[in-house]
Image (cartoon, grey):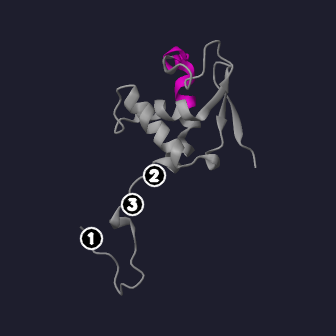
Amino acid sequence: MSTTERVTLPSGAWVQLRDPQTLRRGDKQRAMRAVQDDGGDLSQALDLINGLLRVLIIDWSYEFPIPDQTPASLDLIPLEDDDALSEAVEESRKLLFPAKPDPKDVKDAASPTAPSAD
């Protein structure tokens, strides 16, 4: 099993990310602390992505330090790479911060009838 993934970004730069399957509870806590340390809000998607990037990026080809060493490095990433980088960490985001289930989406196997319309 691979423990990293190299992602090539639109600018030609690359980032080396941890495999989402290697993430643990402590990594989730580090991402949440990173958001708080930066004065962010966990309910804001951008703040959450920035916290995840600080945990997930282990190397990159940019000429500045990785975000875990210097969080302000995230501000220096070329704009053309921003969306691709956010997409690259989406699997990890869903793993660490899954959406809450909607009771309307769950079928009750014991129910003799179909769900009623709201």
| Extreme-top residue of the structure | 63
Q: Quadrant of residue 34?
A: top left
Camera-side mark, 1 or 2: 2
The disc labelled 2 sits on which kind of residue? Pro
Residue visible at 66% across and 43% down in the picture: 19
Camera-side mark, 3 or 1: 3
The disc labelled 3 sits on which kind of residue? Pro
- On the picture, is 99 further left or further right than 66? left
- Tell me if mark 1 has few (under 14), some (14-19) or many (20+) residues whose alpha carbon lies within 10 angstroms of its own: few
Residue visible at 42% across and 81% down in the picture: 109
Q: Is residue 89 magenta?
A: no
Q: Which residue is mark 1?
A: 117
- On the picture, is 53 further left or further right than 41? right
**Extent of the magenta region:** 73-85
Residue visible at 56% across and 22% down in the picture: 69
User: Distance of mark 3 from mark 2, alpha carbons?
Assistant: 9 Å
Q: Which residue is mark 3?
A: 101
Q: Quadrant of residue 16?
A: top right
User: Residue 80: x, y in percent?
Assistant: 55, 20
- Tell me if mark 2 has few (under 14), some (14-19) or many (20+) residues whose alpha carbon lies within 10 angstroms of its own: few
User: Residue 90: x, y in percent?
Assistant: 53, 41
Q: Is residue 79 magenta?
A: yes
Q: Which mark is residue 98?
A: 2
Where is the C terminus found, in terms of image quarters?
Answer: bottom left
User: Distance of mark 1 from mark 2, alpha carbons?
Assistant: 27 Å
Q: Earlier in the sequence, mark 1 or mark 2?
A: 2
Q: Earlier in the sequence, mark 3 or mark 1?
A: 3
